[in-house]
Structure formats: structure tokens, C-alpha cells
């Protein structure tokens, strides 16, 4: 987990920011040559995350996500349809009934690209030069607060 913080006084109830870096399901040594090539390209030219950067085992994903989400009747926002599908498939049927997952791309039409969102009041985890997932979480959160409050 990169960071978590308690909500500020002006934040809506349940508004806690949390960024968790999950380790991949498959170790690097078991990837095909093609998969390694794709992962290396993404690391070098897109997000800067190395395959081994994550700190939390993938086997903990379901427990951590359900513990964080089901404390409140929160809406969970994810970036991208594939991530929404992954999260939906990770959960059991009774958990799915209590969870509302929104894809940022669909509900936030007026949100600029992450590259152009304001970086004020954000932090980086210190490991990523190009794109930091933690900083992106803060950018989206700040955008959401400005839009809704």
C-alpha cells in the first residue's frame, strides 16, 4: 500500500484515499517472451512500473478490497473497463449486490486526461519517475472534490 489517509473535515463521509500496489498473479519468470516484451514496453514508455514493484501479494487482493469497500455503501471508481470487469469477477455474488462500481471513463466525461490534471495537493510514492498511480489517485480525488463540493 502506498498511502492511506483519514478524511478531512470537508470530505464526504467514507472518502478515504487508498492506493494499493498488487503483485501480479504470475511471477516474471513464468511469463512468455511476448508477455515480457509487452511488460517491459509498458514499464519503459507508459507507466514506469516494474513487474516486481508491488508490495502486496495478489492473493490478498480480494480481502483488502472487500474490507475497504464494504464498510460503507460507497461507489467504487475504477479507471478502465478491464479493471471494472476484473473487480466484478473477483467478488462473490452477494458482494456484487452491495457494490456499485463505476468506470471513470464513463461517468467523468469532463475530466481531462490524467497527464493534464492539476498536480496541486498531490504526492508521489517516490518510485515512479514518469507516471505514479498514487499521484493519479490524488489527481482524480481532487478533481472529484472540486466537481462535487
Image: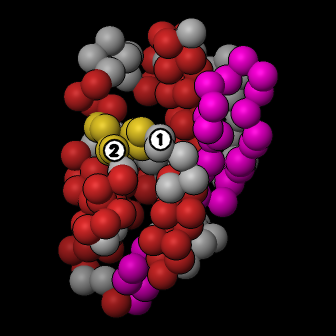
Where does the C terminus fall, quadrant-wise?
top right
Seen from the viewer's position, the closer of residues 139 and 147 is: 147
- Residue at x 71% of width, y 49% of height: 3
* Horizontal arrangement in the rendering, residue 47 relative to residue 95 (left or right): right
Which secondary structure type mostly characterizes the magenta part of the structure?
loop
Q: Which residue is mark 1?
A: 74
Give the CA distance from mark 2 to mark 1.
7 Å
The magenta stretch spans which residues?
1-29
Q: Which mark is residue 100?
A: 2
Question: Does residue 80 appear in the picture of this structure?
Answer: yes
How far across and how far down the image is residue 135, in percent? Answer: 60, 36
How far across and how far down the image is residue 9, in percent? Answer: 78, 22
- Numbered circles on residues, count: 2
Colour scheme in use: secondary structure
Q: Is residue 129 above or below residue 104?
A: below
How far across and how far down the image is residue 44, in percent? Answer: 44, 53
Q: Is residue 55 above or below residue 2?
A: below
Amino acid at each position: 500500500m502506498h498511502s492511506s489517509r483519514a478524511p478531512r473535515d470537508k470530505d464526504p463521509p467514507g472518502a478515504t484515499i487508498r492506493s494499493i500496489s498488487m503483485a501480479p498473479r504470475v511471477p516474471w519468470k513464468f511469463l512468455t517472451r511476448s508477455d515480457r516484451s509487452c511488460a517491459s514496453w509498458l514499464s519503459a514508455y507508459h507507466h514506469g512500473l516494474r513487474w516486481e514493484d508491488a508490495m502486496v501479494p495478489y492473493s490478498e487482493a480480494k480481502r483488502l478490497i472487500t474490507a475497504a469497500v464494504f464498510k460503507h455503501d460507497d461507489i467504487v471508481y475504477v479507471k478502465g473497463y478491464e479493471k471494472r470487469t476484473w473487480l466484478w469477477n473477483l467478488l462473490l455474488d452477494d458482494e456484487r449486490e452491495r457494490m456499485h462500481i463505476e468506470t471513470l471513463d464513463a461517468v467523468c466525461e469532463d475530466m481531462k486526461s490524467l497527464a493534464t490534471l492539476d498536480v496541486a495537493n498531490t504526492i508521489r510514492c517516490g518510485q515512479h519517475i514518469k507516471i505514479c498511480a498514487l499521484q493519479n489517485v490524488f489527481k482524480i480525488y481532487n478533481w472529484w472534490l472540486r466537481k462535487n463540493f
